[in-house]
Image: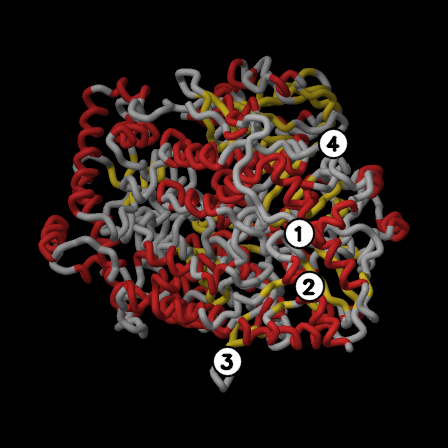
Amino acid sequence: MSKLIFEESVKGRKAVSFPKPSQAESAYATIQLPKALAATHPVELPEVSELDVIRHYTRLSCKNFSIDTHFYPLGSCTMKYNPRICEKTAALDGFAGLHPLLPQLRRGEALTQGALELVWDTQRLLCELTGMSGFTLQPMAGAHGELTGLLLIAAYHKDKGNTRTKVLIPDSAHGTNPASAAIAGYEVISVPTDAHGDMDLEAFKALLTPDIAAVMMTCPSTLGLFERNILAIAELAHANDTLLYYDGANMNAMMGYARPGDLGFDVVHLNVHKTLSTPHGGGGPGAGPVGVKESLLPFLPTSIVEKDALGKYWLRYDRPKSIGYIAPFYGNFAVLIRAYTYLLHLGGNGLKEATEYAVLNANYIRAKLKPYYAEAYSRICMHECVFTAELQMKKGVRALDIAKALIDEGFHPPTIYFPMIVHEAMMFEPTETESKETLDRFIEAMIRIAKEAEANPDSFAEKPLTTEISRVDETKAAKAMVLKA
Amino acid sequence: MSFTPHTLEDRDEMLATLGVSSLKELFADIPKSAHLAKLDMPDGISEQEVYDRLHALSHKNAHELTCFIGGGFYDHSIPSAVDTLSSRGEFFTAYTPYQPEVAQGTLQAIFEFQSMICRLTGMDVANASMYDGGTALVEAALMAIRSTNRPRIIVAGGLNPIYRRMLDTYTRNLHIDMEELPVDEGAVDRVKLASLLTDQTAAVIIQNPNFFGTVEDFSDIAAMAHAHGALMIASVYPIAMGLIKSPAEMGCDIVVGEGQSLGLPLSFGGPYLGFFAVQKAHVRKMPGRIVGETTDRHGNRCYVLTLQAREQHIRREKAASNICSNEALCALRATIYLSLLGKQGLTDLAKTCMTKAEYAKAQFAQIKGVRIKNSAPTFNEFMLELPCNASDLVAELIPLGLIAGFPLGRYYPELQNCLLVAITEKRTQVEIDAFVSAVKGLLK
Amino acid sequence: MMHYTKEHEWVKIEGTGATIGISHHAQEALGDITFVELPPVGKVLKAGDALGVVESVKAASDIYAPISGTVSEVNTQLDGSPELINQSPEDKGWLCKLTKITASDADPLMDAAAYKAFLG
């Protein structure tokens, strides 16, 4: 059991030293804040040595499963290998040491031409990848991209004098979609999924009233299935001046094969921490750039990087129809450096190959597990496959139990209980960077678990058995609310 | 290069398992008319070639200049151990700790982060992080609107002008009224505030130190807000907490801020770190992930994501916020940074920044025609009033290798002659003296 | 007599007052209840108005007033012991009481037998 860093504290112990004032500067140390403003006591931070800190956090790190240590088929999260070249380029001094206010100085753009060129070129590559006319790289996560996209859609309708108060969202969508729509000021209407895993087209037609601002779709859907009605949906939506929003969570299934723009989507966000392999960081930082078709370009957030006739890059702030500032600066720049590095490294051919093998790997798992687990929808999947634990439930073994059993087999669990429309859902996304050997070992483990569920269902309650802690008491956590030390 | 490990034999064997003859067949559900012939992008290049391209780009940036710009984003020194530890793949290639048995490392680190933010601000509860200080402030405003069920927000004129603009963007479609207090480098105008406060006010937002560097005790403002049933929101600079009375002691209900100073490089604007803390009464309205302590089946202490019923994956359109991914790795860096800094270290660092800034103020004050505009105490940033246009001055000094500060005319037309100067522990006396004499030379 | 809604609330009408809670089925579906948000006493509710929220670790459920009335009392015991809803959903785990009710609002609601059939 690990101590908290505070519990390792010893009065008077110190770690690193910081620069101190010079002798001349020290003469001004007597100037202090008046008592009413001054701290009443020191902040109770730990008193530890540098080695204490190194050992503490090294030990903590070893308690994690990660892509570097384990196969991590967490559906909808695209846990692919994070290339180390991207870490190296993001840390270059010429990027890491750059103050974001520099280009706002007069002629300050000259001081940051490299950074602005990187932003501009990334915008250009993302336009090509998605078939859009323009991009903002400012959104700092997928959900932030969704909100930005919805603010753009609201600005578009307002500009046209349209009164639109509602957004249509399939019942299989990520929770962020309805939450973003609500924060943008829209009422959310859920669209059902049909028996084959596509959007229910008849229901959609009935719901597509003149007050619908947008349809937010994930394509392929969160069921891992390509939306086969997409062209019809786009046509119906556009005839109603309803915009089509593309949640890019599953773009890893389409690179080089199809572009959201060509399918009829008007606004797109990408999750670069999924598709473009920037690290997930234990929950972030990510980046959620947003692309739009030409009709929405005037509304993109302040500022946009442009290239002038002389090949110089500059920031355009004077954009009267812009929705304004959605972030303080130019987005999660160091994340974007990684994405740009990845885009150049893989190139058009490599991105397409990544998609092909992501889809191959998912279908391989699907085919091999089909005899042992019930598929949510039986058809060729894209980059992820969704099963239900219904067969195992007959013996009382739930998706959660299967997830915990996988931990004992040395694998990170899949996403479970999502999508919500699939009972006891288990969603596997292997990604393209896993080898056939790894997939085979994983499949064997899943088959062992299925057989164990049949033969010895009671054994699951205690799993996992191989981790430092067993299943945790979540009810106690929520009731006791011990949220700090 | 696509980092796919498959040999051709693997591929063929896997395709045979699926009963298809080519990879292309797997994409049959995509309508033929929408099939892309080819991405108009160059083919991939080697790691070395990519590095050379990025290295060349990085060299087109003037990062080696001595920087006196702050404006909410500061050039503090970062101990080496922060990079070492946050570069561990077990941390940065993990994802959101949904499976607590295999994520205790991340969960405990977040719990420690929440604890440190609570200790810095004096507040009861902190979340696992927001995207940045600006979006954290926006979320605080939205939370106040939800909690009080009132439509008005009063914003102090000393709020970072970028955050002020962000508030406008996010609230435009939500029937929320933003009410302004006058822009002033000094104290918040209490008389004006009193005239704006009503039973329709959801919150009062202030920043400490304010954008112009001035430090203020806003305890009385919090009392005024509370008397009208409104919440008090403060955006604070975490390093300054080493010297300034905590926002909790001043009566805050919600405290947010930009955590970039806590071990994150400037990196041209991100990734940064929003922190968000509240008094316990407000915890269920708080956005973002929260880690709580609990026990496992054997009674071992452990950590888990908790109070998730507030969040989008459960509450969907009724969630407290749409946030999902946050800035976990940045929060880890901040936690490591604060551990290395330690109790005495934070006080010392804050004192160093303030002392150096006072030294610089004294030197500038001796230049004829230059005045320190702040009429109240400052921390590490202050406002110089110049006898010339501040943008001109900054441009003139760039060839001498220094970025003199941020010309306030960019956001405040009435402050064309004012320059915002920030001093951190990284700025040496030699650098400060060179800056002062350059200004002196220029104004001769 | 107990009436049930399709949203799994129950209402027990006694004279001009009524007691409201969530059904056994609802507490079972939610799992361990960790928190209950109740309306302020004195609040006037119309049938169908949201009156509170019941939260468990993995879910949150809005509670709607089955009939119109004015909140006269809330179950303060739930504050420290939300598990009462799991232990005794249709008795000790009641949520709130109403006065000045519109009893006829209950007419379209299900009785115990009909609710049982509804659950299938």
Q: Are marks 2 and 3 on the same chain?
A: no
Determine which quarter of the picture holds residue B73: bottom right
Secondary structure of residue under mark 3: loop
Secondary structure of residue under mark 1: loop
Distance from disc 2 to disc 4, alpha carbons, whole Å, reads 69 Å
Secondary structure of residue under mark 4: strand
Q: Residues within 10 Å of mark 2 (few under 14, many from 20)?
A: some
Residue under pointer 3: A312
Q: Measuring 39% from the left and 70% from the top, which residue is drawn there?
A: A125
Residue under pointer 4: C44
Which one is in front, C53 or B96?
A: B96
Residue under pointer 2: B433
Q: Earlier in the sequence, mark 3 or mark 1?
A: 1
Say which amino acid is labelled 1: Ser
Say which amino acid is labelled 2: Asp
Distance from disc 4 to disc 1, alpha carbons, whole Å, reads 68 Å
Residue under pointer 1: A22
Image position, residue C23 (x, y; %): 52, 22
Q: Quadrant of the N terminus of chain B?
A: bottom left
Which one is in front, A115 or B399?
A: B399
Q: Residues within 10 Å of mark 3 (few under 14, many from 20)?
A: few
Which chain does the numbered disc 1 sit on?
Answer: A
